[in-house]
Amino acid sequence: MQENVLNNHKENGVKGNNIKELQEAVSSLLPHDCELTKIEFEGPQLVLYLKNIRSFYNDDNLITKIAARIRKKILLRCDSTQLIPEEQALELVKKLVPADAGVKEVRFDPNFNEVWIEALKPGLVIGKEGSVLKNILINTGWSPRVLRSPTSPSEIEKGIRNALLSNSDYRKKFLVGLGKKMLEPSTGTDWIKITALGAFREVGRSCILLQTPKSNILLDCGINPDTFDPTRAYPYLNAMNLALEQLDAVILSHAHMDHCAFIPYLFAYGYNGPVYCTPPTRDLMVLLQQDGLNVMQSNGMTPPYGEKDIKKQLNHVITRDYGEVTDVTPDVRFTFYNAGHILGSAQVHLHIGEGLHNLVYSADIKFGRTNLFDPADTRFPRAETLILESTYGGRDNLLPRMEDGEARLVQVIRETIAKRGKVLIPVFAVGRAQEIMLVLESRMQPDECVVYFDGMSKEASAIHTVYPEYLKKNVQRRILQNNSPFDSPMFKHVISKERKAIIESDEPCVILAPSGMLTGGTSLEFLRNLAHDERNTLIFVGYQSALSLGRKIQNGIKELPVPSSASGKTDVVKINLRVETVDGFSGHSDRSQLLAYARSIRPKPSRIFTNHGDEARTEDLARTLNRMLHVETRAPMDLDTIRLH
């Protein structure tokens, strides 16, 4: 209600970030009796402070006019002198918000002049056309910020919200300081280059450095979770030839560890800039990073960063929704587009040098049907260069229809249950776990067997219910009706002390446990205890990278050395259980979908680089795209530097 986003760049808008010009432009449109007291940049967005907010709302189109004129995202706030005391504001909020909105908590943030309202039904807090929000702002002076409550308790959501509120003074100073940096005038951009720092001709440690004469920006910064060898696990940051303090921004596509896990390292060693991502990515990133830290510590490793660095990172996150155009430096702006991969996953469209060049970084995409998300977007304002993932880019990487995969999965589960066995499905806690839960909830009866979901899957599922607008309409509708499929009675969350009883029980069951490639986590613990019994079944439903334990089992290894969590020694596990791979559930596009995606992009890119795939797959996909689209294609190697303009 109190903000507006301009998604295109109009020629008649105010150019540049000159604060005096912006103030003059705003003042020329603003009624005098609004009493503008201050204009302030908070990072990439502009905040207007007014003494008479009621006068502003006499013209419903005023904020749109201002945004169109100055080409910025606008936030509207009352001047601090107009805020009524918190106790009075709380009473007014309670009166103005309908009782059936399910308000859980109301808190105040005086650093941003905001009132945070957490509710099960945010739509009722917003009101028709934002009427309730407008009344709260006009009558209390506090700008309402509406948060959705998860349908089941979430410690990570609670922790993130508490941290953001308790550190709002720091965040305010950081955002204002960042805003001042962005006021620097834009000079000519006569060259643009990218450097491959990870995930080129390999899967893992995704990281790209984008540079112009004015900008140093990282696209993703992950690890290779399949190895603990530092030379292969971490991106080649030393090849940047610049100090971490010289980085201007990190733009994160999504929350999987191979894309986000090394960002706290940047903060541990000198980086103090922004991290841009979607709101769900922020929450899932913190969840996965904290778990990764715990796994490393439990394995006796020394992590490259600590929990304090994850918390510092959180204070520097700036969230953006799909479609919001955001200035990140004076000569680079970006926009997130749906990637269809996991909750909040994004393709990154970069508009560089006042139209000099446009780059699309696909990151991980799904251009096909899933139960959770719409397919990846393919329409962009401009697209000269495309960096395209190639996880399943090889000529033989064709996945079955999703319906066939679902039927096969349920068939194998029922065959195992008939033998009184247990089914272990290693899943990625974010994405595959929720996809499989939707399949089981829709295709099996609640009383057929218990489905245990372990580890982070519970928290990740709760986060999905906080952001239903990122999900497919039918799933979104169920969550909004408080009928979340993730809260079905067939699913039971497992805590650590219950695992032994589940393993020793004679009752058949299904166990969903991370990690998805058996590189650690509770899936490995369950495998160690279930592998000897031939009645049991291990089902792979996601990608198994070349170095992973999952790939070794797929390739037929029957005896595996597995570190013992209790003694620290190595046990030999005999693989007697049934091993199945059921394709069709991957969050990545297969080869046919990748080719269809490339054909569908509008406008057609003139150059395509392939990455995020085994060497043979990236090369084969690049050759095929060259023949099919008649454009320049290439499969760069890690450490390659390429001039785009």
Image (cartoon, rainbow, N blue to C red):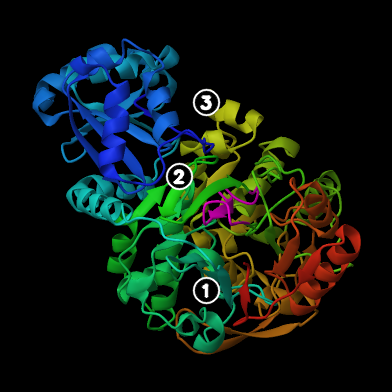
Identify the magenta region: 339-358
Do tag 3 and tag 2 residues touch (Cβ < 8 Å)?
A: no
Do tag 3 and tag 1 residues touch (Cβ < 8 Å)?
A: no
Question: What residue is rendered at 37% in x and 46% in y?
Answer: 157
Mark 1 and mark 2 lie on one chain; the one further toward the N terminus is 1
**Which residue in the protein does label 2 denote?**
320
Q: Which of marks 3 and 2 is in front?
A: 2
Work out how far the residue at label 3 is from the one at label 1, CA to CA, in angstroms: 36 Å
Does 469 lie within the magenta span?
no
Type of amino acid at the residue the image marks with label 3: Leu
Q: Nearer the viewer, mark 1 or mark 2?
A: 2
**Which residue in the protein does label 3 denote?**
480
Type of amino acid at the residue the image marks with label 1: Ile
**Which residue in the protein does label 1 denote?**
223
Asked whether residue 112 appears in the rendered view, the answer is yes
Q: Is mark 2 on a helix, strand or loop?
A: loop
Type of amino acid at the residue the image marks with label 2: Arg
* Percent of width and height locating residue 439: 71, 43
The quarter holding residue 8 reads: top right
Asked whether residue 575 appears in the rendered view, the answer is no
Question: What residue is rendered at 27% in x and 32% in y?
Answer: 24
Quadrant where the C terminus sits is bottom right
Q: Nearer the viewer, mark 3 or mark 1?
A: 1
Quadrant where the N terminus sits is top left
Which one is nearer the viewer's eye here, 442 or 473? 473
